[in-house]
Image (spheres, rainbow, N blue to C red):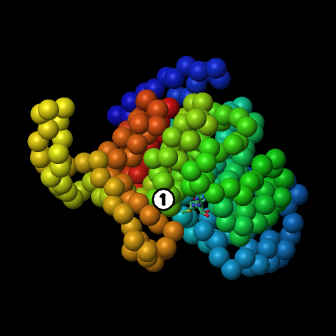
Amino acid sequence: MLQAINHLLKRGGIQIQDGLAQSITPGAEIEPPDSPDRESLIALVNSFPYWYQRIYLGQGVYTLPVLQLHNYVWQAVKEMLPDGYNGASVLDVGTNAGYFSIQAKLNGADQVVGVDFEDRYLKQAEACRTIWKLDIDYRQIDIDQLQPLAMGQRFDVVIFTGILYHLKNPLGVLEQMATLCSDAIIVETEVISPRHKNVLHVRQGPFGRTAVTPCHTGFMKFIEKYELNGDGSNWWVPDEECVLGMLRSAGFKHFSRPRYFGETRMLVIAT
Ligand SMILES: C[S@@+](CC[C@H](N)C(=O)[O-])C[C@H]1O[C@@H](n2cnc3c(N)ncnc32)[C@H](O)[C@@H]1O
C-alpha cells in the first residue's frame, strides 16, 4: 500500500494516493484548439531530426509513433496526485519537448515553468506549446551549475523526471530543488536494480565505535563516458535507498512507496 500523505500546506497540500494502474488505457486525446492541418503538423514533426518525447499535436499526429516511458510515468503520477496540479505552480526540470509541462497545464496548473539546457529541445517545446496555445514559460538553464538557481519564486510541484542520473552533482541539485519546492517533488530516475544483492564493506557506526561492516544499500554507481546507453550525458546511477537518502538529506520528509517501471526505473513522490 502506498502511504497516504496529507501534507497540509498553504495551497491545501497534495495528497498522494494508492491504486496505480498497471497500463495506459488508450482514450480519446484532447484536441489542441484550432490546430493546423495534418500535413503541416507532420512537416513540423519531420523538421526536427530527433524527438525524445511523444507529444500529441492534434489531427492524429504525434511526435513519436509509440508510447514512451514518460507516458507511463505521467499516468502513474496522475493517479498518485489526482488533484496535484489544480491551481499549482509547477517547475518542470529537464523539460525536453515539454510533455510534462503541457500535461500539468492541461490538468489545471496555474503557472508552469520548464527548464532545459539544450536549445534543440527547447525549440521543440516552444513549437508544441504554440500548437497547444498554452501559457508555459520555457527557460534555458543548466541546473547542474553549483550556483544557487535564481528562479525568483518557489513552486508547489517540481517535476524531476529522467534527470537525476544526468547530473554531475545530484545531491547539490536536489538541495536546490528543496529550496524551490513548497509542496511535492516528483522524481523518476534510472536506478540500480533492487533485484541484485550488492555489498560494500565500509566503516560505519557512532563515534569511537566504528567498524568495517557489510552494507547492502545506499549506493550510487559512477558512469564513465558512454557506459550507459552510449550516452555521455549520464553520470550517476543511484539505488532506491540512495535516492531516498539524498531526498531526506535535501529536506524532503514524506514519501510515496517507490514504483518501478521495469527493473531499473523508479518513481517516487516526496513532500
Ligand atoms: C532523459 S531526458 C528526460 C526528459 C523529461 N524530463 C522526461 O522525463 O521525459 C533528460 C532531459 O534533461 C535535460 N538535461 C540534462 N541535464 C541537464 C542540465 N544539467 N540542466 C538542464 N537540463 C538538463 C536534457 O536536455 C533532456 O531534455
At numbered mark 1, what does the secondary structure look like: helix, strand or loop? loop
- Residue 258's place in the image compared with 127, above or below, is above
The quadrant in which the N terminus is found is top left
Task: Classify residue 65 as left or right of residue 34.
Answer: left
* Residue identified by numbered label 1: 168
- Residue 59's place in the image compared with 182, above or below, is below
**Which of these two is toward me, 253 or 204?**
204
Q: Looking at the image, how many numbered discs can be counted on the residues?
A: 1
Q: Residue at x 54, y 64 (%)?
A: 68
**Which of these two is toward me, 105 or 236?**
236
Q: Percent position (x, y) of residue 155? A: 65, 36
Three-letter amino acid code at disc 1? Lys
Q: Residues within 10 Å of mark 1 (few under 14, many from 20)?
A: some
**Which of these two is toward me, 231 or 41?**
231
Q: Percent position (x, y) of residue 15? A: 52, 28
Q: Percent position (x, y) of residue 113? A: 72, 46
Q: Residue at x 64, y 20 (%)?
A: 10
Mark 1 lies within 8 Å of ligand 1 (Cβ measured) = yes
Q: Percent position (x, y) of residue 56? A: 70, 61
Residue 161 in view of the camera: yes
